[in-house]
Amino acid sequence: MSVPSALRYAYREIRDNYDDRFWWRNRFFHRVVAPFHLDVYPTREGSVDVMAEDWDTLVVLDACRRDLFEERADVSEYDDYRTVTSRGSATQEWVLQNFTGESYGDTVYVTANPFVSREAGDAFHALYEPWLTAFDEETRTVLPEETTRAAIEAHREHPDKRLVVHYMQPHHPFVTAPDLRFHGWQIDDFDDWTDKQEEAGLKDATSRGRPHTPWDALYMGLVERDDVWAAYGENLDVTLESVDDLLAAVDGRTVVTSDHGNMLGERTFPVPLRVYGHPSGVRNRELVEVPWAVIEGDERREVTDEGTNAADDHREDVVQDRLEDLGYV
């Protein structure tokens, strides 16, 4: 982009968003905090290369904090458990750092998250996309049992491939907490929110269509942290039940991990701002420390590499709609 074009772009962005507190915070994280973190803590330094690790099935719990996993899962039941450092603090970043530009002809990927299809759709032998084929209109997400169903089908059709199963949970929308879902919400539905917004200095936020996510609502002071944490944990609970069903149907060595975590108002550095959700490029422990839980199967899978195949192209508006449902847009 030329200098004049960049200046015009910056002018339009500031003109349209100068009074939007959310926009300024996002720009600050993107332009100041993330570059500082990535300079001090390079993404690949000391982080786990998931494809170089030893597993037959890799279960990815989207946006699962280490401490949430340890609270909700009995880690003593795993054959091995440790924490690792992720290569991303958001799914798109994690996908770009682990898969994009590489070829894994020995791997089939099942994803409930559209970012995998968009950023690395040609990196695998086959790609199964329940985000497209099994989207639940009521909860505005892919229910974990649908991801498990697609994964079992993928394993049955490709028994000689490594298998990545990327659940959308515990990332919001929270399946068991409809009060913390904000797709299509109306301010009239929340009589006490106006006063809470004014107390938080965010009285104009709802006029801009916010909150989009539970993290927005938490930042705005509209919900309690304990309620969000409880719903976040319940979202993990229902997913772990589906993971158990998956484990009963696949052989080999399984690792359960996550792409990144979430922050619920913990402060970042070098500027001690509170962070909500999972902005990319931020290296707080709550975002990049993730579980690495190992289940040793009775018999290892014999894996063959038969080359990669490009996934189907999807209309960008379809991808954007799903990303919006999941709180990314």
Image (tube, grey):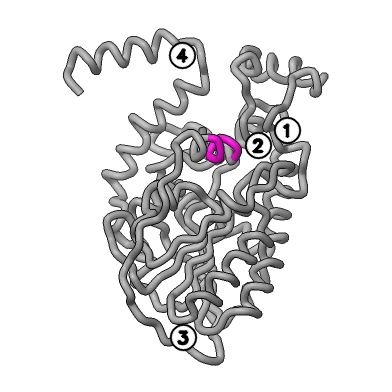
According to the picture, the residue beneath numbered tag 4 turns out to be 17
The first of marks 1 and 3 along the sequence is: 1
Question: Of 259 and 247, which appears nearest the observer?
Answer: 247
Q: Nearer the viewer, mark 4 or mark 3?
A: 3
Q: Alpha carbon of mark 4 to alpha carbon of mark 2: how far?
A: 22 Å
According to the picture, the residue beneath numbered tag 1 turns out to be 223
Q: Alpha carbon of mark 1 to alpha carbon of mark 4: how far?
A: 25 Å
Q: Alpha carbon of mark 3 to alpha carbon of mark 2: how far?
A: 40 Å
Q: Is residue 323 magenta?
A: yes
Task: Tell me, yes or no, whether the two marked residues, 2 and 1, touch with CB atoms within 8 Å.
Answer: yes
Q: Nearer the viewer, mark 2 or mark 1?
A: 2
The first of marks 4 and 2 along the sequence is: 4
The first of marks 3 and 2 along the sequence is: 2
Crowding at label 1, few (<14), some or many (≥20) Cα neighbours within 10 Å?
A: some
According to the picture, the residue beneath numbered tag 3 turns out to be 301
**Against 113, is 250 above or below?**
below
According to the picture, the residue beneath numbered tag 2 turns out to be 214
**x then y, percent, for residue 199:** 69, 17
Query: Horizontal placement of 258 versus 4: left or right?
Result: right
Which quadrant of the structure image shows residue 303?
A: bottom left
Which stretch is magenta?
A: 321-325
